[in-house]
Amino acid sequence: MTSTVGAWVRNHPVAFLVLVVAVLTAARVTALVLTPLNLGPDEAQYWSWSLDLTAGYFSKPPLIAWLIAGSTAICGTQEHCIRLFSPFMHAATGFVLFLAASRLYDERIGFWSALTYWLIPGTSFSSLLITTDVPLLLFWALALWALASMQASRAWQWPVLLGASIGLGLLSKYAMLYFLLGIAVAFLFTREGRSFLLDRRFAVAGAVALLVFSPNIIWNISNSLATVRHTASNANWTAENLFNLANALSFLGAQAGIIGPVAAGILIWGAVMAWRKWGLSSADRLMLTLSAPIILVVTLQAFISRANANWAAPAFIALCILACAWAVRSTKRWPLVANAMVNGTLALLLCALAISPAFVAALGQDNAAKRLRGWPESGRTIVTMASSGSFTAILSDDREDMASLYYYTRDRQVPLRMWPSMNPANEYEARHALTQDVASRVLFVSRRKDVGTVTGAFTSFERIGTIETRLDPKRTRIFYLHALNGPVTAATFPSFSNRPSTD
């Protein structure tokens, strides 16, 4: 029986991949529908952006908001509708990896690359959220397929696809620039490589990329380079605690967790074998230049200041392919089978954790889920108090709280506003700041106890209660509520602005 199944898979690899990804995607969509976990602050922020579509936003390019606008138009505004496109886009990314790896190596490596990508813990986790990495990885894979095809064919559809993929990748996340860095490292240092880059097809690709990305360029120019400046500020090189080896090691450990323990072991073993015995093929070198510089740059960033685990996410497109290529080169299939089994088990485990709070508690992971709980209850209470207290606005002083409340108080009748700043640091301070026209009586919602900076800007205030939401047996989220009356005049409160805010 086993040999019969194996023969069928070998004879029908694409059909098997379709079957696997259909089951995986169905499981992930089911988990999205059944999960009691709320939107994370970033997801809620992206949803709020989708209500006002533009060519750019304060902290990110616009494609994530466009995607959410599309999914909610189809499905509605429930949490699973906001996240709906994520598992389907990851499914598409895996198929593109099959095409790219088949072009670079052969169909067998393409088969294992797609399977590996779908099952790695990073993909399993990301499929249950909607983030900017989801479209970025799809367009990165498309760009890789186009680049590989340009090396083998002079057909004009490949430079057009390359340029469109780079442009759409940049509209997803500026980390797409790493792809250009990888191309430069791969081809600039050999005569053949430079000749390839100087081909007029790359001029076409560059023109298409610029055309696709141009709306965000124009938006940034019109908005004082807001997104560019915010992205640069994420480096945080002015922090007090610089140069921390523990941060770098933690980041590298997280990368092993993203791809899974078996695949990480294959990459380490393969690197040793390539150095001592195999050498590197041209495809190997391309995969390394599209992954190693990203890992190195972000590890350095983690050492200097800090880095989130997902900042090197694009590297895993090439690393999935490279791990499979090295495993196949060893003529041993069991590492790839073991990798699929381990990561497949973890994929199903993540779906189960998303669906069952009891399972989360049994594994002692309540702390990991605390940010995704309790928001509907808090939102309903705040909406009720705002309606019954004749308030003209609800006010928040924290970007993440503001994002979550924007979604979970979406039935409110009064506007939700952010505490204003002379130098806005996020989209809410830039476009949803409290203004004098709605500041006569404000319901101020904050998790901070010391709020004198805010309350002191009003002629009178009073503490009117707290909202205490139980997140799990050990943790509680507490909001302190104040009624603020009569803002101080603009002369003594210059951060107030008379510009209109949008809801």
Image: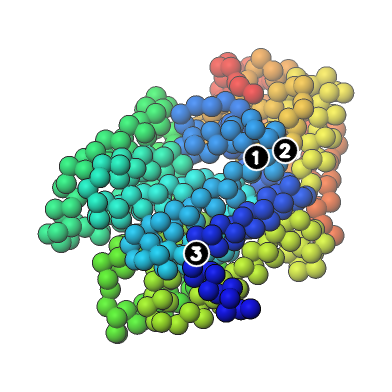
Query: Mark 1, mark 3: which one is toward the viewer?
Result: 3
x, y (%) of residue 465? 86, 37
Residue holding disc 1: 82
Badge 3: residue crowd in 10 Å (few <14, some 14–19, many ≥20) = some
Residue 419 visible in the snapshot = no
Between 479 and 67, the one lying in front of the other is 67
Can you tell which quarter of the image residue 99 is in?
bottom left
Between 372 and 238, the one lying in front of the other is 372
**Outermost residue to the left:** 191
Can you tell which quarter of the image residue 350 is in?
bottom right
Identified by mark 1, the residue type is Ile
| SS category of the residue bearing label 1 | helix
x, y (%) of residue 25? 63, 54
Q: Quadrant of the N terminus?
A: bottom right
Asked whether disc 3 touches disc 2, contact meaning CB atoms under 8 Å apart, the reply is: no
Can you tell which quarter of the image residue 358 is in?
bottom right
Say which label, 1 or 3, has the lower sequence index: 3
Give me the C-alpha separation between circle 1 and circle 3. 33 Å
Residue holding disc 2: 78
| Left or right of 486 on screen, residue 315 | left
Residue holding disc 3: 13
Give me the C-alpha separation between circle 2 and circle 1. 7 Å
Mark linked to residue 123: none
x, y (%) of residue 448? 72, 43
Asked whether disc 1 touches disc 3, contact meaning CB atoms under 8 Å apart, the reply is: no
